[in-house]
Amino acid sequence: MIMTRAIALLFAAVAMLGAPHAAAQVDNDLQRQIDALKEQVRRKDIDLQVLAAKVTDLEAKLAECERKGERVPAPEPMPEPAPAEAPPSTDPLQPTPPEPLEPAPADPLMPPAEPAPVAPPAPSAPAPANDAAAAQFVSPEAMLNAVRVRLREDFGTRAGSSDPKERASYQRELKSWTATTARSMRREVTWSVRLVEAMSARSGRILIQAVVLDDAGRELGPCTIELAGAAAKSWRGVTIAGRRASVRGLATLELTIDLDQQEARPFRNDRFIGPCLEGRVIVTQAVLST
């Protein structure tokens, strides 16, 4: 009797010791499932951001066409249907049209007719506008150069003018122009980068300074990569200086106005857009892989 009770107590103790381990295993499984769901939600958010950026890009192009006085081409009208042929007349007084003559058989002694000359191929159509828009996002340098060109087109000589009235007009319109331009310069990108430095930010985010490279390893401008959630967690505490990686995310512009700045600052000349304006490229919703 005593032996049976001891065995029962032993089994109960083993069950109590194994319960915490089983509970911990369940918590780990749940946490992995939660992280996987968060990653799916984050990727869906990237897709929505990309679609919103494309809509904004189209709206900006339409506004630019209206500003320049260009008309949006209207759809071509549908061709009118050909009139139906009238049935042959049964009036005996109405003359009947003659039947078409059949072609005479070819004379076997005559040489064959020469083939008709082939028309030269039509010139290739110009590249669609989407290709030109995509070229603005091949690198941070391309994005900033596109903004510099747009600044010259929209403001002309007022940018950097010595005339007080023109300078005041330029500075007054620069704020709204900057906001509109930043909204239109957003697109999903995939860049090859060399990582330089990482720093922690609020809400568990990590900001990584990087340089974009082309296939030959040439530098195409710096950018800031913002990692959040599971993407930041996997890179926390990792040594990154000099490491090569691939980044996928939403490339955006951060434009800063400084009314006292008229030329590029030392060690930051790559950010200078024009008088009173600097910019840098940030990749948000980023996924970093090596």
Image (cartoon, rainbow, N blue to C red):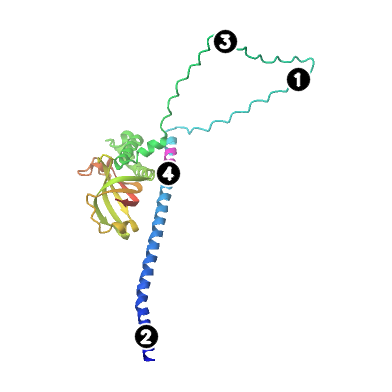
Question: Which portion, as a residue range, is magenta?
Answer: 57-62
The Cα atoms of the two marked residues, 1 and 4, are separated by 62 Å
Q: Reading the chain from its start, which is encountered first: label 2 or label 1?
A: 2
Q: Quadrant of residue 169?
A: top left
Q: Given this view, does label 1 or label 4 mark the residue nearer the observer?
A: 1
Q: Is residue 92 above or below residue 155?
A: above
Residue 54 badge: 4
Give the left or right position of residue 223, taking residue 186 as reference. left
Asked if disc 2 and disc 1 are in contact, CB closer than 8 Å, the reply is: no
Residue type beneath disc 1:
Ser
Q: What secondary structure predominates along the stretch shown in magenta? A: helix
Return the residue nearer the eye: 112 or 188.
Answer: 112
Indicate whether residue 149 is drawn in magenta.
no
Q: Reading the chain from its start, which is encountered first: label 1 or label 4?
A: 4
Which residue position is annotated with label 1?
A: 89
Residue 7 badge: 2
